[in-house]
Image (tube, rainbow, N blue to C red):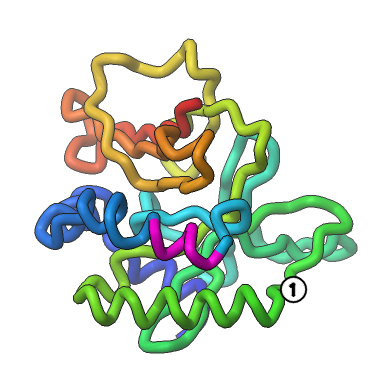
Amino acid sequence: MTSSDRFQSLPLLEEARSRFLSQNGDNLVANVFRSFFLERGVERRFGLLMLHHHFELQPGEKLVHYGPCATPWKEIDGMPEPTPTVWGVFEGCLYALEYKYSKGATASLSSNDLHFMDAFHQLQVEQGVDGIFGLCEYPGNDFDGSCEITQGRANVSLALKDYPEDLIAIDTTWFFKESLWKCGCRCTCNAAADDHPHGTHVITMQG
């Protein structure tokens, strides 16, 4: 199975949230995964996320983050390949699920990264949540938050002052460095949107 196939197999937000709640996910995040990240010293390398997707990709596409937007990309002649920024481990195999474009960026994972990812997968299996959680790249010590709204097949990051307060927030990503522990990535579905149940999705990284 390719990484694109794996991305397509991820649940939509509503299903992912239901699975998360059925496994007491908030408790796992706070009392299992947090200590796991801190004990291994990776809190400045990776964040934890609830795996899900908002829209379908076409064959040959990757979801690529560039600036404040994440959109489907196909290979472009003469441009370097985007580098992974979100990963999932399924049945012991590592898959890149989302990417970023930055000229000169490298895609290599260290042996320590790979060892941690293997241990992360084993922990999920032990906890009975295999395939529910993934890993994302740490956003940096200067991370001050953003709000990402998904319309159609594009995700656009908004300033926090523009966050739609009438939407119901759903946490989807957690960073465990102490200064960011209370800063989460939230994906919110607007039940009043015309196209609900898919609705208007908002991911909030709140500093």
Q: Specify the amino acid type for callout 1.
A: Ser
Spot the residue most to the left.
22
Residue 124 location, x and y as percent? 31, 74
Residue at 59% x, 55% y: name it.
137
Q: Residue 159, image x and y in percent?
A: 54, 19
Which residue occupies 30% across, 34% down?
A: 188
Residue 127 sits above or below residue 160 on the image:
below
**Residue 108 among magenta residues:** no
Q: Quadrant of residue 139?
A: top right
Q: What residue is rendered at 57% in x and 61% in y?
A: 42
In this picture, residue 179 sits left or right of residue 45: left
Instruction: Looking at the picture, tell me which residue is in the foreground, 21 or 13.
Output: 21
The secondary structure that most of the magenta stretch takes on is helix
Q: Nearer the viewer, residue 84 or 137?
A: 137
Is 189 situated above or below 60?
Answer: above
Part of the protein shown in magenta: 35-40
Label 1: how many Cα within 10 Å (few below 14, some 14–19, many 20+)? few
Q: Is residue 190 left or right of residue 201?
A: left
In the image, is residue 36 part of the stretch drawn in magenta?
yes
Tell me where residue 89 appears, x and y as whole percent. Answer: 44, 77
**To which residue does mark 1 refer?**
108
| Left or right: 22 in relation to 86 | left
Residue farthest toward the front in the current orientation of the protein: 39
